[in-house]
Amino acid sequence: MKNEFLRHTLATIDYRFQKSVKYRNADFGSFTLGKESRTPKEIINHMYFVLCSTTIYIIEERVQKKLPDKLDLELEIERFNSELKNLDKILSENVLDMKYSKRLFQGPLSDILTHIGQIAMLSRLNNNPIEWEDFSSSPIQTENRNN
């Protein structure tokens, strides 16, 4: 499998992201802690931008500077999920060397994992904690996610 580690990382991001937004209530997208902290929908918008920028960089080797439109929570989730699948497809079709792969892992992919942790924390603070799980044993599937 091409880019197996990066694709597994994307599958991990997908799994953890779905858990972090699974039990959302109607006002979760706008939930805020104040003090200029991002809301869940703003965090997901940023995560989408990071994914989209990564895809563009891999394909065109240029840096994306245009920020995406802000959407409501459901559309932000849908758009993020779609771009996650798109990036997985790109990784399945192109071979990246290890140096390039390490940069993607330590930069954009780790950034997204950090933000998923923020969403999980906000979910807990919004009275919807994520169920406990041993994530090292989670049923994460790397291949055939684009179907």
Image (cartoon, rainbow, N blue to C red):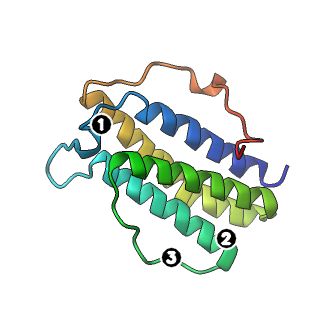
* Residue 126 quadrant: top left
**Nearer to me, 111 or 122:** 122
Residue 94 shown left or right of residue 24 in the figure: right
Query: Disc 2 marks which residue?
Result: 58
| Residue 64, numbered label | 3
Crowd tier of the residue under label 3, counting other residues whose Cα lies within 10 Å: few below 14, some 14–19, many 20 or above: some
Query: Is 121 located above or below residue 107 in the figure?
Result: above
Name the amino acid type tagged 1. Answer: Leu
Q: Which comes sooner in the sequence, label 1 or label 3?
A: 3
Crowd tier of the residue under label 1, counting other residues whose Cα lies within 10 Å: few below 14, some 14–19, many 20 or above: many
SS class of the residue under badge 2? Answer: helix
Residue 130 shown left or right of residue 95 in the figure: left
Residue in view at x 63 percent, y 63 percent: 103
Residue 136 picture location, percent across and down? 63, 27
Residue in view at x 77 percent, y 64 percent: 96
Query: Disc 1 marks which residue?
Result: 122
Name the amino acid type tagged 2. Answer: Ile
Mark-to-mark CA distance, 1 and 2: 32 Å
Residue in view at x 62 percent, y 66 percent: 55
Residue 89 shown left or right of residue 78 in the figure: right
Q: Which comes sooner in the sequence, label 1 or label 2?
A: 2
SS class of the residue under badge 1? Answer: helix
